[in-house]
Image (tube, rainbow, N blue to C red):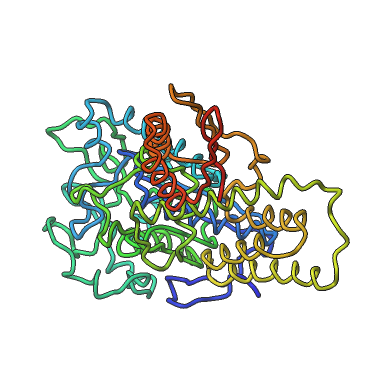
Amino acid sequence: MNLRLFNSLTREIEDFIPLDPKSVGIYACGPTVYDFASIGNFRTYTVSDVLVRTLKFSGLKVNYVMNLTDVGHLTGDNSGDADTGIDRMEKGAKREGKTAWEIAEFYINAFFKDYQKLNLTEPNKFPRATEHIKEQIELIKKLEENKLTYKTSDGVYFDTIAYEKTTHKKYGELSNLDQIQEGARVEKNPEKKNPRDFALWKFSPKNEKRHMEWESPWGLGFPGWHIECSAMSMKYLGESFDLHTGGEDLKQTHHPNEIAQSEGATQKPFVKYWLHVTFLKVNGQRMGKSLGNFYTLSDVEAKGFSPLSLRYFYLSGHYQEPLNFSWEALRAAQNSLTKLTSIVSNLKNTKEDQRTKLSEEKMLKIDSFRDEFTAALNNNLNTPQALAVLWEVVKSNIPSPDKLDLVYLFDEVLGLNLNQITENKVIGEKKTEKGIITWYVPISQTTIKALENRLETKAQKDFDKADAIRKELEEKEHIVIVDHPLGTIIKSK
């Protein structure tokens, strides 16, 4: 079975057939680096990562590019008020009393740290918009030559009506046309020929000095948000390439605009397959700072959860389905990962010379597991099913060394770092006045504090309360608490 993906462009699940049989080009819309990336953003980046890993798993070479937006993304660009508002980078600069350049550098570094903690595949290129101004200007000039632009008092705009006449294609074919047709957007620029038209280049305000601005054939200013992705993707992947990924919100304006300006410039098909990831919800609501439910990876770690537990949580849901985040759901994911790592640790205690000659039945079972895992991935990246196959493997009766081989093979795609788990060794230790707490599995700071409280309770000879704490922790955290004369040992259940 070949890899099959839901293509947002055709609205169908299709066989993935790359333009080059041996190599795949993928472009992922990355973060706007004016603030920390949210765990909602990282769901999308994790899906892109799984896609890259799946393609490599199937033997293909992958050229993976993810952009970093460090200029031009206005506060109205994600709503009906396209091309309005202030540049998010300038907004971040005012918020923190820094320059936009300093804001970009700080949040790019923060993004890279979080990216690595989630064990995401490093792209071949991480291009920054500010480092590709020349390419963006050249692309706008090409559109101008093709008579697809016009100038207003505040910038240079893409003419969607001229595009439709020139290319004989409908603008906005990627999304639902009724959501982006004429009159559907809030109109705040009376100089625009059509509400659907969008900025390619914005002029710097005459009464304001921007941190980021460049000279252009049209005047001092900065690029619009959409042009960077067309310019950078085509520079590194060519005028036509295989896959483009992003969050579902980008399907309405940003990605249709990419298609229009790219194909308007080259007269060639831009991207063959578009993959969009559904929003992460928080307790049933969309994540947002105004709702007080905007979480970053640092928030997750502060609650005592590991980044890989969050990755496991992402994998537990299909990318096309809404995934509902709650601390309880994340705790369940961490408990599952803790149990899995403990099993893998025990498997690593099995020496290679204990590998037995396989019966025909077990050989067939191993082949079956491998086929089931591959089939799950090829079925539109069904990661919940892929995880289920992994659990079937570790619970099966095939020899431990062979289990470990399959676990490591599957983890090439799942990315849970299962090959870095050591044999049953001490992960952490804390000395208290009442004893030593030693743990062989990952536990949270909250659990450590509860264990300290339990040692204190035992010292006060309140054994009923100490036992109640033990039972609650063992049930909730899926651990085993073992007391000894010097303190307490924590193992996996």
The residue nearer to you, when weighing 268 against 368, is 368
- What residue is at 25 percent from the left and 55 percent from the top? 78
In the image, residue 103 lies at what x, y percent? 31, 31
Is residue 133 among the parts visible in the rendering? no
In the image, residue 268 lies at what x, y percent? 49, 65
Q: How many discs mark residues in the rendered view?
A: 0
Query: Position of 328 compared to 286: left or right?
Result: right
The residue nearer to you, when weighing 180 against 40, is 40
Q: Is residue 150 above or below residue 74?
A: below
The residue nearer to you, when weighing 460 against 380, is 460
In the image, residue 81 lies at what x, y percent? 18, 56
Q: Is residue 269 above or below residue 445?
A: below
- Residue 93, by quadrant, is top left
Is residue 281 among the parts visible in the rendering? yes
Q: Is residue 387 above or below residue 472?
A: below
Query: Position of 325 compared to 122: left or right?
Result: left
- What residue is at 34 percent from the left and 43 percent from the top? 296
In the image, residue 92 lies at what x, y percent? 25, 35
- What residue is at 31 percent from the left and 44 percent from the top? 223
- Residue 299, by quadrant, is top left
Residue farthest along the top direction in this orientation: 433
- What residue is at 44 percent from the left and 44 percent from the top? 470
Q: Quadrant of the N terminus?
A: bottom right
The residue nearer to you, when weighing 17 against 485, is 485
